[in-house]
Amino acid sequence: MVDSLLKTHFPDLRFSIDRLFERAIVLIRSPTDAIFSFAHLQFTKSHVEMAPDSHFTGEKFYRSLKPLCLKWKKFYSYWLGYQKYQRGPVFNGPVFPVLYEHLNSGGSESRKQILGRLSQFLELNGQHLFVNCTDCEGAASYYRHSPLKAKHGHSLRNDSRAMEILARFKCLAMYEEIVLQYASAANARGMA
């Protein structure tokens, strides 16, 4: 049974994380949404506040996308072992990948099915309590609050120049591979 969890945005590669932790839960988010969210986080230093629209225009913004793409790739390369896209150390323990979009939209599995499998992965007793508890909080408290919808909405998908940058740094290709691997694993479980 797991007795502690660590939430992190990036691995600290100055020491070996897999010596500290036996397994990992990796929330996989599309680079078009995650990098947009990283940009908000960098500007506001908050997980729920939004940067002004002016932050997402001009050369400074587009130059900021390269390091954000590299961080996104480094994060998923480390936790999922994708040496093809990013060289360096990888986490060696068992990994439980979850597509963020599946938690929000359902995907091939319901949220309860995903969380049920997660409870088994973590060897939690009282699985039903863990799963039911996730529906108590209400998802609205975990989103950025914005009185006006930003130019980009909540993604970079509508910005062709940003999408070109994400493609150039292979974030989109890597994400497509991750999604296909996730779908293949779901097929093997009979979920797709």
Image: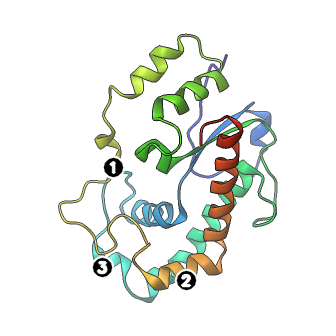
Nearest to viewer (mark 3 / mark 1) = 1
Name which of mark 3 and mark 1 comes first in the sequence: 3
Left or right, 59 with respect to 117, comes to left
Q: Which mark is residue 54?
A: 3
Q: CA distance from mark 2 to mark 1?
A: 26 Å
Query: Residue 125 appears at what percent x and percent y?
Result: 58, 11
Going from N to C along the chain, the mark reached first, 2 or 1, is 1
| Mark toward the start of the polypeptide (3 vs 2) | 3
In space, the residues marked 3 and 1 are separated at their CA atoms by 20 Å
- CB under 8 Å between callouts 2 and 1? no
| Picture layout, residue 87 above or below residue 181 | below
Q: Nearer the viewer, residue 6 or 180?
A: 180
Q: Quadrant of residue 77?
A: bottom right
Q: Nearer the viewer, residue 70 or 126?
A: 126
Q: Are there few (<14), some (14-19), or many (20+) residues within 10 Å of tag 2?
A: few
> Residue 3, can we see it?
yes
Q: CA distance from mark 3 to mark 2?
A: 20 Å
* Amino acid bearing label 2: Glu
Q: Which residue is mark 2?
A: 164
